[in-house]
Image (spheres, rainbow, N blue to C red):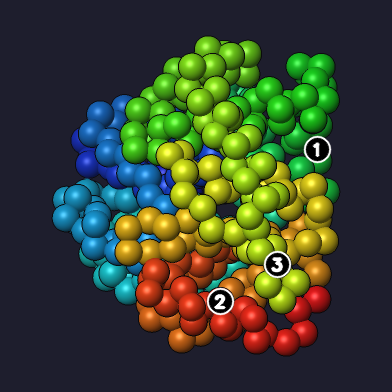
Amino acid sequence: MNVQDFLENIQPNEKMGILSHIDLDGIVSEILFYDFLNKKGCKNISVFFRDYNVNLMDELHEELENLDKLVVLDLSSNVLGEQFQKLGNEKDILYIDHHFSEIHFSGRIIELKTPSEICVTRTLYETLKNKLGKKREWLVVAGIISDAGDRFEINNEIINHFLKTINLSIQDFKEKIVFNLAYFLDYFHDDLTGAFHILRDLDNYSDVSKLEKYIQPVKDEFNFYLNDFKKNKKRINGVEFYLFNSKFPIKSSLINELSYSTPRDIFLIGTLEGDFIKFSARCQSGKINLVEFLKIIGAGCENALSGGHLKAAGIVIRKQDLEIFKNNLMTLKNIS
């Protein structure tokens, strides 16, 4: 079975599930597939949103078991693991991703992996465009840009074509739409299903202004921690290292802002979440492979979970392994 077979074989009476990453790329992708299922007449659709978590499949096991078919979007195979494969031996699953990984699945899992620079939003939009039309084009472009797609020439045509139709520069679109949508999602970090349905109801990009009451509190906190970073960061072995805890999950927005401002610097920023510390790493110049970098400095950290892209990656470690992690960073040789 291939992707088109999976799409055509979906029946209106089936229990369908969509699971995606919690960032804009993942959630826009989920909106697109939800729209497609509505067009197919599906009424029983469950949506799930998860960040990278060592217990991800455990948390969802019972709910996913009860589905007839499942779609998984923008989650690295590193985080899905053996339980996902077992599920794929029992039911049809469509899995679309663009993160680097050496893990591949078999059985009834239809796997569509694209190069890192082609995000899942774009892949799904092009796959479903003839079935959905152009209603979501503004949101698709926002999803692509949010995943740094504007930094790759391969995405220029789809981005520039849309921006010409609305007569906005890419910088204006980022500031008015993309950044604000990221803040909006951070506000709803505990209720991403609510955020999902609010986004689905927006007719065009100008409607983002209606979300200001959600956006401003997150923007204020972002600015506070941007200043705090400059005061309290540590430079460890040439890496800008920073730990913080905030009300809203602004880590991705913060590290993206910093890394785009100084693209040759290496940033490693973490937040404590329960018994774990989640680190994001960025180096926009590409002078270091961050996937390999995190594997090396995560060595010795029990059950460490890492993955991502050359210029943007992440790792989850147990909080009791922080000193091991930092020592690996301090002693690592030949960091560019």
Tag 2 near tag 3, CB within 8 Å: no
From the viewer's perspective, is residue 145 above or below residue 211? Answer: below
**Which residue in the structure is indicated by mark 3?**
235
Query: Of residues 81 and 248, which is closer to you in this image?
Result: 248
Horizontal side, residue 182 vs residue 317: left or right: right
| Residue beneath disc 1 | 157
The amino acid pointed to by label 2 is Lys
Q: Residue at x 29, y 50 (%)?
A: 69
Q: Amino acid at mark 3?
A: Arg
Q: What's the amino acid at mark 1? A: Glu
Frontmost residue, 283 versus 90:
283
Is residue 316 visible in the rendered image? The answer is yes
The 10 Å Cα crowd at callout 3, few under 14, some 14 to 19, many 20 or more, is: some
Residue 65: quarter of image = bottom left
Dot 2 or dot 1: first in sequence order is 1
Near mark 1 (Cα within 10 A), the count class, few <14, some 14-19 or many ≥20, is: few
Residue 66 position, x and y percent, is 16, 51
Of tags 2 and 1, the one toward the viewer is: 2
Q: Residue at x 76, y 57 (%)?
A: 284
Instruction: Return the residue nearer the eye: 46 or 127.
Output: 46
- Residue 46 image point, x, y percent: 27, 39
The first of marks 2 and 3 along the sequence is 3
Task: Tell me the residue at 77%/84% (across/down).
Answer: 334
The residue pinned by badge 2 equals 326
Side of 47 where 249 appears, left or right: right
Q: Is residue 208 shown above or below 117?
A: above
Report x, y in % for residue 36. 43, 32
